[in-house]
Structures are given as C-alpha cells and as structure tokens.
Amino acid sequence: MGIWELFAIATGLSMDAFAVAICRGLSLKKMDYRQALITGCFFGGFQALMPLLGYTVGLQFKEYITAIDHWIAFILLGAIGINMIRESRDESCENFSNGSLKNLFMMSLATSIDALAVGITFAFLAVDIFPAVSIIGLTTLSISFAGVKIGNLFGTKFKSKAELTGGIILIAIGIKILLEHLGVI
C-alpha cells in the first residue's frame, strides 16, 4: 500500500473526528488553540492506537484468512464507508457543553472504532504498520485541530459533507483493493 493510499485512508478515517471537532468548536465562545490542540491530540492518538490494536489482532488470524483477505478488506471498508455516509445525514451535533477530559476520551474512542477494523485489514494486506499509524494519527490530529477552528468560525455547515466524503473515500479504497486482487486493475 502506497503513501497516497495510506493518506487517503487516514483522511477518510479522520472525517468522523473532524465532524465531532466541528461540534467542539461550536461549543467554544471564542477560539481556544489549546483546546483545539488537546482535541486534535486525543483524536489523533486514538486514531493511531486503534489500527495498531486491530493489526495485532489481525496477525493472529492472518494465516487462516489469507485466501479471502481482499474480500474482508472490501467488506470492512465498504461497511465503514456506508455507515459514515448514513451518519452524514444526521445534522445534529453531540453536546460539548461539558468539555471534560472524560467526555473527550469517550468521543475519541467512539470516533476511532472504525480504525480498529482498518487495522485488521492492514494485517491481512501486510501493511507496514508503524508508518501507517503515524500517518493516520498525524492526519487526524491536523484535521481535528482544523475542525475545532472551522466549527468555531462557520458552524455545522461542513459536518455532513466531511462524513459523506470520508465514507466515499473508504468505499473507493475497498473497491480498489478487491479489483487489484481480482486482476482487473
């Protein structure tokens, strides 16, 4: 898997965190760069940790699943993408009036569950995991930081478009993996 594919996956995975970061920005009376950085670090850290955990789990089952790994990657990425597209229709923002670390921890965990499945897929595809999780974590940190700023400036205008775009990216990558394995491309 190339650097551009990893960056595309990282961008797709970070769209849930971006949408939540926009809501975080909405809850701030004025832009607070410290809060934006803390939010980015939480989301980026969880988005990096979860694929690493998924990769570790995936390695345990790799020898049993090698013959169908491309289908698993296609199904997992497609399901995550479809779920993100479905969520893009929800215009509400989670309540961030309580900016506690516990709340941020829970939101970071909730937005990174799909990254766990991607990590399992990485194990089946023999992706070099440390560069992959670094790209995912740093991309999510940057995009989440920007999300807080955008939310503080513009509101929920970009939330649903971000989730829709992320879902489409993940579905496209799943299709590409399947077509490559089948020899179509």
Image: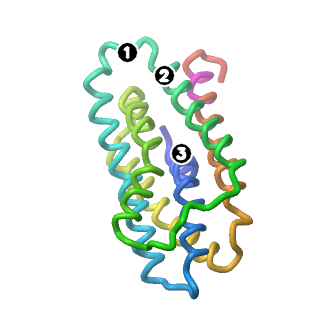
Q: Height in image: 184 above or below 97?
A: above
* Residue 168 appears in view: no
Element under disc 1:
helix
Circle 3 packing at 10 Å, graded few (<14), some (14-19), many (20+), is many
Residue drawn at (49%, 60%) of the image:
139
Residue pointed to by mark 1: 65
Left or right of residue 14, residue 110 in this image: left
Residue pointed to by mark 2: 72
N-term mark: 3 or 1? 3
Question: Which three-letter amino acid code belongs to the residue tagged 1?
Answer: Ile
Cα distance between the residues tagged 3 and 1: 22 Å
Element under disc 2:
helix
Element under disc 3:
helix
Q: Over which residues does the magenta segment extend?
A: 176-180
Residue pointed to by mark 3: 9
N-term mark: 2 or 1? 1
- Across and down, in percent, residue 84 comes to 62, 43
Q: Height in image: 93 above or below 90?
A: below
Residue drawn at (38%, 72%) of the image:
100
* Residue 160 appears in view: yes
Q: Height in image: 15 above or below 114?
A: below
N-term mark: 3 or 2? 3
Asked if disc 2 and disc 1 are in contact, CB closer than 8 Å, the reply is yes
Magenta span contains residue 107 = no
Circle 1 packing at 10 Å, graded few (<14), some (14-19), many (20+), is few
Front position in the image: 84 or 72? 84
Question: Which three-letter amino acid code belongs to the residue tagged 2?
Answer: Ile
